[in-house]
Amino acid sequence: MRIKKLSLIILVSSIIFSLATPSAFAGFSYPSPAEAIEQIMSSLGVNQTELKNNIQVMNVSRQKKTPPQVSLSFTPASPVPGSEITAAASPSYFMNDTTKLYFTWYLKHNNAGGGDGHGNDDLNDDGRINIEDYKIAAMRLIASGNFEWNREDVDNYAAHTDSDGYRSAFGGDDQRNKREHCFIHNVKTGDESELPTCKHLFPNAPEEETGDDHFNLDEEKFWHTNPNSSDTTNTGTFDEAAVVGLGKNTFSWTYISGDQVGVAVEGVSIEPTSYADASYKTMWAMPKNTCEVDTTERIPTDDSTQTQTTSIDPDTQEKTITTTTITNHYSTGDYVVKTGYAPGIAVLTSKTIVVHTQKYHYNSFTGAYDDVAYDDTTTTPEWVNSANEPFSGDEINLFYDDNTRYPNPSEAAPTDQTLTVSSDFDLNDCLESNLIDPAEGNSDKNMTIDLSYLPTTPMNGVSSDNSNELSIQSSILNIENAAFINYDWTISEPADSMSSEFLAMNSATKKSIASQTSGINLSSLKIKLAFDNQPNTFYIKVTLRAKEIIAGEVKKEGVKSIIIPIYNSANTIKIFPVAVSDASAISLVDTPASLERCKDGVEKIICPVVKNEIVGMKTDINPSTYNIIWSLNGTSLQQNASDPSIAYFPILQNQGTRYTVTLDALNKNSAEKITLTKTFAVTNPTVTISSADMSSCAPILLGHYVDPINKNPNPDTDNNSLWPDYSADSFAALQGKMVTLKPTFNYSSSNTFSWFLDGVAITSANAPEMGASLTSTGELSFIADKKIGESYSVEIGDLYTQPKTTKKALYDIWNVPATAFYEKPVGNSINIKVTNQLAGEMIASTRTPKQKVLASLFAEIPTYISFLLRIALTIILILATTNIIFSFFPKQSPR
């Protein structure tokens, strides 16, 4: 039994071990590591091309980071020579708060004067005018503020009583007790190079160091600070802290044309260093991010060392001189280097050793050495490297790549490849290329112009009542003083009804401009739209050219155009009285046509209305073709449900208020749009008397006046621009002719008014006796049968109040309380002089001859003034006559 078990164990073992022999695996094949990885990624669905792209991006991601930056803005944006300007620095991508950063400002002049002929001086007396002097010029102004350091009556620097020193820290005021590591960012490559030594950019007084916590009297005097105050500018900053620019993110100075300013901001980047400490990268930001790091000098050139030894054989006295020259050779290329180091573009590739041996025999007779008896040179190359061979030995003690120096390969391999610039690199060399001219920044040569217009839907109409006055308003930014802006407006009209080309205005259109088009203080332009022969919708182009002129020099200029759609319409809004039923139902009284209100003269432009009346409006736009919407001062208005072309609104405001009614009509079958407007002015109730027949009775012509828009260049020979000025209360009537007078109310009258002729009330009963008659429309007629030169006195009187039905409608519909209603007497009177001719009275285009002006004026003077004038002339005549009579009597001497 034991033998069987033993035999079984031997058999199984032999099978197992026989399978483990190499021959047992001869039939199997395994993938290479690369193939295995590829199979795994394929089975996981990984896109290898995309993965490679991501890895490539990751390999260069350190070069894509954003370094600390600073931008400058100026107030005012457009500086004026001789005025103060303030530059404000806005840093970003710093870990510090702004109050902990160091702002080193520098100011360079570019005008006549100064030690360099451009306004700059050697402020630190080092015999040069350079960036240090520009920094001193700026930081002096920041540190001294308004302190009067150079007063003649006071010796400000006789003693030093304050303690205003400040010790700076690399990277900002909040980076104390941390190791400093300073870096510079190469904008072109994205690399960040570590500076061999950290050095502030603060300006220094001669033989002094800024930021060393010692601010002595010499420094106080140099920086123009107050030696008896630790805070000269009263900003909560010690004087030396002000000189280093702690938190000084603004800088003000008196601008002179050509000035340039810059700032270097020192702080720590949001990126930490790779050192095993708590440090972050100390970096500087400059306005233009211009700081070139020259790497060409970092590639070493071949160098050689030479040693010489002399030996004398003690037996033969033979002298041997051996000169050994070792030359290091560098070249570029990709070389495999020690593990952990990046390949470089410039590496030590070979070393050549040249041994020159010379032997001299000693001449015992002469006691001197004879000529050389042996001269031999041996050249031995060593440590030649190739792309396939790594460095060997610790003798190769350095190698380079772009702007990089790595330590001895025998040292531990670095964890990152931190770039290091050479010791001769100076950040000050970058400052001047970061200067900014305030007059060139912020697009200062171009002002920003914006144009707008009202109404938003302007209507054109040569004969239409709804021709709008188009108002174009300008808004100009980026200017110093609006008072110095010169405006030049031009308006272009379509070339024809089918053209999109714009041409200059013709002379007829120019007359429609209601304001001056060029000059100062012309920020707006008004145009009375009166374009002939235009389609339903056309466009005009308005262009504004503006210039800011200061001291006779054009500082800025700009141009802006706007194309405005203009709509043509012959439609109108007509005003009629309304009728109100007992049930407060409102209807329009539009027949006869003579009931239409506000259809002539000034009233056609601004319709006068009175408080507590209901205004009825009607348009001739067909509501079956157009959708009509009425609005009052921008609010929807009640309109007739059965006829949208009719609308009503009440006058509820007091005298002086204006209402603007807008009608918008949109064609149901096209995109055609019509906008009509009507303006109403609330006034006191009034009535005027006018002649219904100008051929028999007309107002007296007082003279002519010049149209302020259509100016006449030669009014003596061309009277087309002269307008007649008629009297409102003095009329003339032809003897024996029928005079018909009509009243015009600025409210809806109920025909309850009364006429008075020569002080007698005219009624239907006594009218025939007075030779007068009253019509159904309220007109008064009578025959002017008085003698020539005699006059009629005509008066009219009414009591303004609203009918009960109107008051009820105002209460029911618009909630007007009964206390809001009032009554007011209304009246007017005229004087009619009987004459035998009306020549000249109604000829509006005829100019009154010069010799008749005074005669016409005196003829129409009221009678009471004429009476007073006669009394005055009589008194003068009596006094003059008395004086003449007494002149004939001899004078008597007093006794």
Image: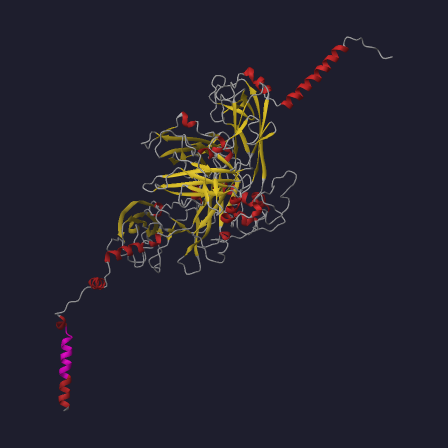
Q: Position of residue 811 (x, y in %)?
A: 52, 48
Question: At 41% across and 61% down in the image, what residue appears?
Answer: 276
Q: Is residue 702 depicted above or below 148 in this figure?
A: above
Count of numbered circles on the image: 0
Q: Nearer the viewer, residue 724 or 316?
A: 724
Please state, as top left, top right, bottom left or bottom right, where the N terminus lies in the image. Answer: bottom left
Q: Quadrant of residue 45?
A: bottom left
Q: Is residue 114 depicted above or below 879 in this figure?
A: below
Colour mapping used in the image: secondary structure
Q: Position of residue 443 (x, y in %)?
A: 43, 39
Q: Nearer the viewer, residue 709 or 755?
A: 755
Question: At 13% across and 83% down in the image, what residue appears?
Answer: 11
Please, which residue is most extreme toward the right here? 895
Q: Position of residue 656 (x, y in %)?
A: 55, 39
Q: Nearer the viewer, residue 511 or 180?
A: 511
Q: Is residue 448 depicted above or below 724 in this figure?
A: below
In this rendering, position of residue 817 left or right of residue 357: right
Q: Position of residue 208 (x, y in %)?
A: 54, 47
Residue 415 can be seen in this image: yes
Residue 555 can be seen in this image: no
Please, which residue is most extreme toward the bottom here? 1
Q: Which residues are magenta?
A: 10-21
- Magenta-drawn stretch contains 460: no
In this rendering, position of residue 710 left or right of residue 233: left
In this rendering, position of residue 351 left or right of residue 268: left
Please state, as top left, top right, bottom left or bottom right, where the C terminus lies in the image. Answer: top right
Q: Is residue 333 depicted above or below 476 in this figure?
A: below
Q: Main secondary structure of the magenta part?
A: helix
Q: Quadrant of residue 687?
A: top right
